[in-house]
Amino acid sequence: MSRAAPEVSVDSVTGIDVSLALAGPGARSYAFLIDWHVRLLLACAWYAAAALLYNGTLSVSAPTSPPGRWFALVLLPAAAIYFLYHWVLELAMRGRTPGKRAAGVRVVARDGAAPGAAALLIRNVFRLIDCLPLCYGVGLLAVMLTREHLRVGDLAAGTLLVYEHAATLPAGLSPGSALDATGAEIVQELLARWPGIEPEARARLARRVLERYAGAAGGVPAAPEGEAALRQALERLLRA
């Protein structure tokens, strides 16, 4: 019988506590292996295509004395694809990569939101330490020894790797919707607690939620007037 993933409760940007299921060594390794193969193939594909075009023959060998154009057009782009793969995709896909999506996990900040560019950069720079001495030995050891399953990069950047919980999303809400699992849980909890929260406080919380998520959902106003309009906007956000 499989054990449930450990969870951590975080104070979200709205002030509502959200429970996040933490990804362990297995999910991390699975996601990393997929991403490693993807970025290696992309980097090699660029190198091969650029080298063939540069040489003008069916050869990918570097010139005997490579000029600067060789490095600029062939080698550096391939290296950039390999080393910037995680940072660029995690930034563009809100904490996800193809490997993480396949494993059902994503990177989040301590408040449950998508991490910023600086945090993701720090997280990925520290891969240089996590990969020591080989096969991510330091990183795997840190994940197994820390309570929240964090590698050194996560500790430095203040990030978590959590499960998406796509199966727990409300009816009609897909993983590609404006809301992610964390956002859906925040909106659901706010609506459930709506009658018991002071009017001023619930209006303030609703506006904060809408400011964060309404922009990605077409047709949902970011700052409606009146409590009834705020609640209706939250309900529409779940269906957007």
Image: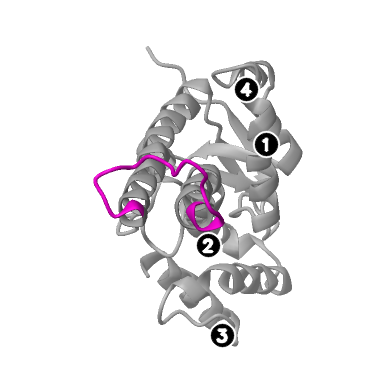
**Is disc 3 placed on a helix, strand or loop?**
loop
Q: Are marks 3 and 2 in contact (CB under 8 Å)?
A: no
Range of magenta residues? 55-70
Residue 89 position within the rendered picture, expressed as x and y whole percent measured from the top left: 48, 52
The answer to which of marks 1 and 2 sits earlier in the sequence is 1
Could you tell me what secondary structure mostly forms the magenta stretch? loop
Task: Answer left or right for 142 relative to 156.
Answer: left
Residue closest to the far front:
64
Residue positioned 55% across, 78% down in the render: 230
The answer to which of marks 1 and 4 sits earlier in the sequence is 4
Which residue carries the number 3 mark?
224
Residue positioned 46% across, 17% down in the render: 3
Task: State the separation of the CA atoms marked 1 and 4.
Answer: 10 Å
Residue 84 lies, with reference to residue 40, above or below; the image says below
Which residue carries the number 1 mark?
154
Q: Which mark is residue 191?
A: 2
**Is disc 4 placed on a helix, strand or loop?**
helix
Task: State the separation of the CA atoms marked 3 and 2.
Answer: 16 Å
Residue 135 lies, with reference to residue 11, above or below; the image says above
Type of amino acid at the residue the image marks with label 1: Asp
Type of amino acid at the residue the image marks with label 2: Leu
Q: Which mark is residue 143?
A: 4
